Amino acid sequence: MNRLTVLYDASCGLCANCRHWLESQNQVIPLEFLDLASPALDRRYPGLRRLQPDKQMIVVSDAGEIWQGEAAWLLCLHALLYYQTWAARLAHPALRPLARALYRVVSRHRQPLSQLLRLTSAEHCPTGACPR
């Protein structure tokens, strides 16, 4: 696995801020980001919309492997140099239910969390340098 493509919702403030945070980290596996609204999504990954990327995080490897939900989130952490240990801990069977529950809560409430935390979306702040 040489590269991961993270599908994300650029209209979601939390999602856009998570993207900028991931980009700012030292990556062991390079992360590429593709907005769900991009026409390139259907060209690059035909049929992927059936997995409902607007409802769950999806990561695709350069080999075509697909991770969804908390597995995608943990894989993104694993791709970061200083978060691999956390990814391994949270993926352990004893903590995986906690990771899954946390992922689900944040995922289901990402828009209200964005508003509550006043996180701007990529369409309103394309550089990620807007005041927070």
Image (cartoon, rainbow, N blue to C red):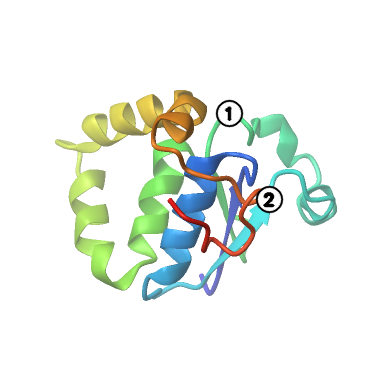
| Badge 2 element | strand
User: Disc 2 marks which amino acid?
Assistant: Asp
Distance from the alpha carbon under mark 2 to that under mark 1: 14 Å
Q: Residue 39, percent across and down?
A: 84, 50
- Residue 126 lies, in percent from the top left, at 64, 59
Pointer 1 residue: 55
Label 1 packing within 10 angstroms: few (<14), some (14-19), many (20+) = few
Vertical relation: 85 (above or below) 101? below
Q: Which mark is residue 64?
A: none
Indicate the amino acid at tag 1: Lys
Q: Answer with the quarter of the image where residue 97 lies.
A: top left
Q: Residue at x 51, y 63 (%)?
A: 129
Residue 77 on image: x %, y %: 35, 57
Q: Nearer the viewer, residue 72 or 126?
A: 126
26 horizontally vs 29: left or right = left
Residue labelled with disc 2: 35
Does the residue at mark 2 contact the one at mark 1 (Cβ under 8 Å)? no
| Point 39% across, 37% down: residue | 117
